[in-house]
Amino acid sequence: MFFTNLKRETALSLRHLFVLLVFAFPILIALGTTGVSESYSTLPKLVAFDKESLEKIKSEDVQIIYVSTIEEMKKRVGDVDTAIGVLENGELMTDGRETEDAIQKARFILEGETEVTSSADREQLFSSIFAYTLYGVFSAGGMILLFKLIEEQENKTIDLQRTEPVPRFYMLAGKIIVSSVIVLMDFVIVDWILQIPFNVGEGLLVLALGISLSLIMGMFMAYYAKNESQALAIIKPVTFLLFIGLPALGLFVGGIMHTIAMFNPFYWLLKLIEGITLNKPVELYSWLMVAFIVCSMLVLRLTWHKTVYGYQKETVMSK
């Protein structure tokens, strides 16, 4: 009966448009991230009239754009990216939006400074971006489990399932397994796209902690959602605050935002993934997540009877 229920849950997931969209979203984000990483440089672009004015440049990381007229140079420098014009007399042309750091880098490049390179900055930046992209996979598990939990309440099929001669846990276990498999598939595909250097142990650790956190969040949200409209109303603030907002601010802004984000268990997961991508894993984040997961499971165990899935199965006594 358990495998029959699992097969049923899988078939329902394949027909659910929301589940398919949630599955595809992290993959599309990962493809977009790799496209940006291939063309992005932390060094400013240089706009010049000829190669002779840039003969001292020794860095291969510098992107150079050649123009024929001063009007073309002004137009190119005025674009939204960091492009700095090099005039014939050696002066620099900017549109006023370039930072002092970018202008100083341009001067160093023109003077032939070989130390100016974007490789280290790019590695640090995109390690964080790749970690954040891969971390986003785990938000899918919580959302999918939440919608799978409420779809039967909304469709009024849960009462029918109560009459089946199987343990009540089978219904929940099937949904958990299907949601976990979807997260696993997303994780493997996104990891392959981003080429993050996980070893087997690190990958299994991140998967176990990430799936556990996301499924716990999905079950907690199911306490309050009785239909898809309520689920969407709950997912919006939870997703933007816990999954997206605080972790992003803590990772990319740092400072006080890092301190605030440290109260968010999903930020611990993000920092663990970032540490692995930079080959500097921090064990503290793993232990913090383990403690949070254990405490959350205890709370769920003690309070799950209040949900429709926790009701004791009614039996009919024959006289």
Image (tube, helix red, strand yellow):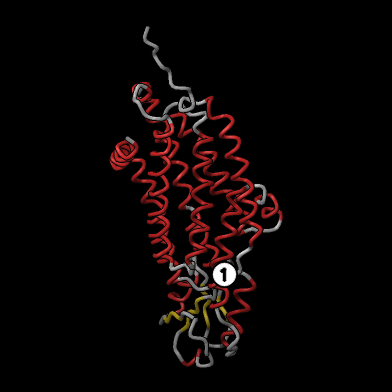
Instruction: Relative to 315, say whether 50 is above or below.
Output: below
Residue 47: x, y in percent? 48, 79
Going 45% across and 34% down the picture, which residue do you hit? 232
- Residue type at numbered disc 1: Leu
The quadrant in which residue 167 appears is: top left
Foreground residue among 173 and 286: 173
The count of marks equals: 1
* Residue at x 48%, y 47% (from the top left corner): 139
In front here: 287 or 46? 287
Residue occupied by mark 1: 278
Q: Which secondary structure, mark 1?
A: loop
Residue 163 relative to residue 306: left or right: left
The image shows residue 258 at horizontal and vertical percentages of 67, 55
Decide: is 190 above or below 60. above
Residue 183 falls left or right of residue 239: left
Q: Could you tell me residue 184's position as x and y percent?
A: 41, 53
Q: Nearer the viewer, residue 87 or 153?
A: 153
Q: What x and y, as percent, mark residue 245?
A: 57, 48
